[in-house]
Amino acid sequence: MKRLFCLILCICVLVASSLPIAVYAEETEPASVSTPSTDTSEPSTEPTTKPTPVAKVTTQVTGVKTKFDENRSSSIVLNLTIKPASPARKVLLQRYSSEKKAFVTKKTYTTANIKKASLKVSIPKDLRKRTESTWRIVVEESSNAKAYYSPNIKVHTRNIKRIKLSSKACCIYCLNTKKVIYEKNMNRRLKPASCTKIMTLIAAIETGRFKGTTSVTSAAVNVPAQRLHARVGDRYRINDLAYAMILGSSNDAAVMLARGTAGSVSSLVSRMNSIAKKKIHLKNTHFTNTYGVPNRTHYTTAYELSRITAYGYRNKQFVKVVSRKTYGFKSLKYGKKYGCLTADRMIKENVKGHIGGKTGFSETLGASYSGLFKYKGKVYAVTIMHAATKGIRWKDVRKLYKYVRKYGNSKY
């Protein structure tokens, strides 16, 4: 039996080895068969790097001014030259917004499609309704040139709104910015009358002899429009005379003040003209006396009188005198008593922000005034010249103060 079983097993093995064998791979993909390449060409030796882009040129712009100080009625135009301008370039006029803290485009221009183009860019009046504004010019990037951004252009605008005034001339000068924010005929030469005494006080203080005394001479008792009616030989403190001159507009006090501080009227007048020319750098001011009696060569302007008042503000003694409402004193030898009340109605009425100043008046010239007004941290020298009457003078001053409140600190 065993031999028979072994024989049958051997026969089965021989039969199985003679049959084809099939291999099943249901879950795997058949291996790919590579075909030998028939390309007999040589491999490429050229580099495969990308082409280098062409560098853009710098945009050149000329004709940009960075400061303007103009009345709102005046046109502001920038005559620009832009290179390259081909292809045609977009030019933006932008104004800075303090609310958005960014520049905002207000006007768009397009240059001619040429190599070098001229372009007029105007800053419109209707976009200058505030005193301070900051602008810039932007030339947009083109296919062959970089973008251009101008330096900031500072525009200071005067006379934003016209004020109806009786005065022949006026000026509002800001001491902080050293700029005029409103004016009318501010460079017209006019006679200052007793506003002259502003400079008389300044010159007297700068002699350094303000704490001394002086005696009355015949020259002092013979001037027009006396207030003290002093006796020859009497003595006064120079400080007291300053208050009598400013508050009471005393001409005799102005003469005595000159003699006590500078030695003579002519000497103090010389100092007054020297301060005007060399220290304040005025060109349309000249004095011939210390109290303002009119003559052909005694003159100033509303602008320059404002500058004189602004200069005086730097001195504490000056401010102390012009801001006083009342003052009392007496002569030293004969003991004559005096009481002075300011002619400054703004002080009398306690107008908020008003510091003080000096009036001027004559029947032929009318009423003038130059004083100091403080609003929101800035100080303004406000001057009006030759109003028709004293009452109208103060109406004009109030109008100018109102302008300061509305536009003095205005900006975009």
Image (spheres, rainbow, N blue to C red):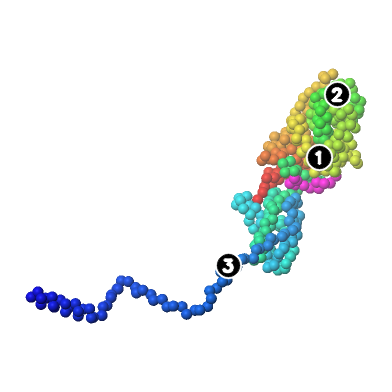
Where does residue 89 sit, x and y in percent of width and height?
Answer: 68, 65
Instruction: Decide: is 331 above or below 186.
Output: above
> Which residue is located at x 26 percent, y 80 percent?
20
Where does residue 93 sit, x and y in percent of width and height?
Answer: 68, 58
Pointer 3 local density, CA inside 10 Å: few below 14, some 14–19, many at least 20: few
> Which residue is located at x 53 percent, y 76 percent?
42
> What's the mark number on residue 7?
none
In which image quadrant can residue 341 be found? top right
The alpha-carbon separation of the residues under discs 2 and 3 comes to 95 Å
- Residue situated in front as seen by the camera: 105 or 45: 45
Amino acid found under the numbered disc labelled 3: Lys
> What's the mark number on residue 214?
2
Where does residue 21 sit, x and y in percent of width and height?
Answer: 26, 78
Instruction: Decide: is 410 above or below 125.
Output: above
Judging by the rendered image, the residue that carries numbered circle 3 is: 50
Amino acid found under the numbered disc labelled 2: Thr
The alpha-carbon separation of the residues under discs 1 and 3 comes to 68 Å
Whether label 1 touches label 2, CB < 8 Å: no
The first of marks 1 and 2 along the sequence is 2
User: Is residue 292 found inside the magenta-colored segment of the image?
Assistant: no
Mark nearer the viewer, 2 or 3: 3
Q: Is residue 331 left or right of residue 139?
A: right
Q: Is residue 97 left or right of residue 233?
A: left
Element under disc 3: loop
Element under disc 1: loop
| Res 405 seen here | yes
> Which residue is located at x 83 percent, y 33 percent?
203
Judging by the rendered image, the residue that carries numbered circle 1 is: 280
| Res 231 seen here | no
- Residue situated in front as seen by the camera: 195 or 314: 314
